[in-house]
Image (cartoon, rainbow, N blue to C red):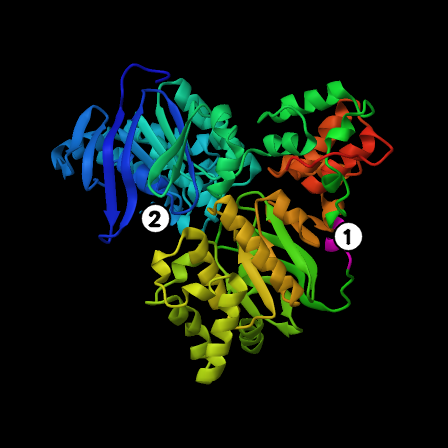
Amino acid sequence: MAPGTCTPIRLSHVTLVYDGEVRALDDVSLEVAQGERVCVLGANGSGKSTLASVICGLLAPDEGAVELAGERVCADGTPDLAAYRRARRSLGLVFQNPDDQIVTSIVEDDVAFGPENLGLPRAEIATRVARELHRVAMEDFAKADPSRLSGGQRQRVCIASALAMEPSVLVLDEPASLLDVRGRAAILRVMGRLAAAGTTLVHVTHFMEEALEADRVIVMDHGRIVLEGAPKEVFSHGQTLMDLGLEVPFAARLSQRLGLPWTCDEAVLLDELAAAGPHNGVARQIGARAASHAPASNRLERQTHARPLLKVEHVSFAYGRRGNALSDISFEVFEGSSTAIIGQTGSGKSTLLRLLCGLETPDEGRVLIAQNDTSTRRGRKAAKRIVGFVMQHPERQLFAETVEKDVAFGPHNLGLSVDEVNRRVTEALELVGLAEKRAASPFKLSGGQRRLCALAGILAMEPAVLVLDEPTAGLDPRGRSMLREVLGRLRERGVTLIQVTHSMEDAARSERIIALDESRLLAAGKPREVFSRENEDRLAACGLGIPRSLRVSRGLERRGWPALGDPLTTDELVASIAGARSPRKAGGENRC
């Protein structure tokens, strides 16, 4: 056990059962040392969040023993409530969904809530509130209403609230799922400083690169710990992780594709490629299949769309006195196209989606949906018929006893016939791959399946435009892949797609990108235009980035390689590297 001698977390043969049948934790034994940084990985439904709740004292197991912060809080499945109360003073938790954690209507009051309950002096509370809001870059929003903040901003408030308690053990459940590239990096830096200062960290995440920062990685499946060890050791089990619905970090996947020594470190991979040089014959190690993939851009940019379905014309919008959430925004969305909206946390992305759905109306300018102005009642009614809106956590829309009833709710309320409702439900469930779950309870589906079920409920309304707010946030790699496949099928059917995303890889798959920066339009165009060399510094300055394949390409050029043609996908990058290494066609077996 790594950094410390004390053991603030000790679980012994812990089992926890939901509803008398679902074993969320199954005979889990775990010890975490003081100051140790542990990362927990696993597919949706593997038991990660349940483990986090046990470690921070929110849940007591049905069987086994638990020691937290020096207190034996549970023995033989029997909780000691007094011991739990004592231990919780040293335990902190950041939930995956900030709406589960925010309790007040003013940001600084929310951060002060925990220290106030500890009975700290007023001056000390004020010091902690100011310090933690500064640490998460939210000091300018101290007087704001959290309900008016973006999802990423609310998540920062929750992190500040947890840090203000100065816990000796901090559990973070997907803390960066709603944050932009810069915000995610900032939270990782904060965690690094906390670990260096002796805070014990348990970090649940679906971002494989984040796990590389940990002292130890734990992989869960069906409530059990199935892999455990140092990050590089765990990620060496690539096939096992894939079988569990996970993946290895990008550098490891790319090194495998290139037939180079396996590494999780992108800098090491770049140095390896730089040392090999572009023309030394190593191209033979790159599989012919990988090298001959057609560039994804041929698929994404093949169409020109003649008819704008949505128009945003000089739109500005403000929430009260906080200044503009959007300032003079103009763009068009063409029928049958796919558009990604990117921007740093709080840049106005979710507000823009609400305007596109007719849920808000502009203070200035206008939004036209199929030539209907949403500033009028008629225009908003038309928007609701045309546009389907998938919220940031669509699974929270689920409420019915069965998947079938949940998906049928919208079409039924349209007054459609029973036969038409059944047709739409069947078609929507087949489209998202849940036809066999028709009679199941939506609450017994996996996390990815619940999101697909909620999506089916929107699709059953047969919208011409589908608007999605961070659709892949909180999903494991398998869930993200499933959702991307569904969106691909929708595109083939001619549905117009608009999605907000913090994933530059997802943005690069779209035909068009709208980039926002602090309420203003930063860039708009095809992915190659938005991610061009001219825009790279501007994107970095506003907390965004570029796709990882493009980042590797730029890194190789800085190390002396020729220009690789701005690859936006892994396939394009592998093909570009193969072409740069040898003018002849590469051969060999693909090791992907």
Decide: few, some or many residues near mark 1? Use Cα within 10 Å; few <14, some 14-19, many ≥20: few
At horizontal 37% and vertical 61% (from top left) the residue drawn is: 442
Q: Which residue is mark 2?
A: 100
Q: Quadrant of the C terminus?
A: top right
Of the image marks 1 and 2, the number of the one nearer the N terminus: 2
Q: Which residues are magenta?
A: 297-302
Which residue is identified by label 1?
Answer: 298
Residue 316 seen from this side: no
Q: Is residue 536 left or right of residue 71?
A: right
Q: Quadrant of residue 157?
A: top left
Type of amino acid at the residue the image marks with label 1 = Asn
Which residue is at 45% across, 53% downward?
A: 448
Q: Position of residue 526 (x, y in %)?
A: 74, 51
Residue 530: give x, y in percent of width and height.
72, 45
Residue extending farthest top: 5
Q: Is residue 590 above or below residue 103?
A: above
Q: Residue at x 26, y 24 (%)?
A: 8
Kindly give the residue lying farthest to the front in the view shown: 588
- Type of the residue with mark 2: Asp
Closer to the camera in the image, 575 or 385: 575
Q: Quick one: SS at disc 1?
A: helix
Q: Nearer the viewer, residue 92 or 73?
A: 73
Magenta-colored stretch includes residue 573: no
- Percent of width and height locating residue 495: 63, 66
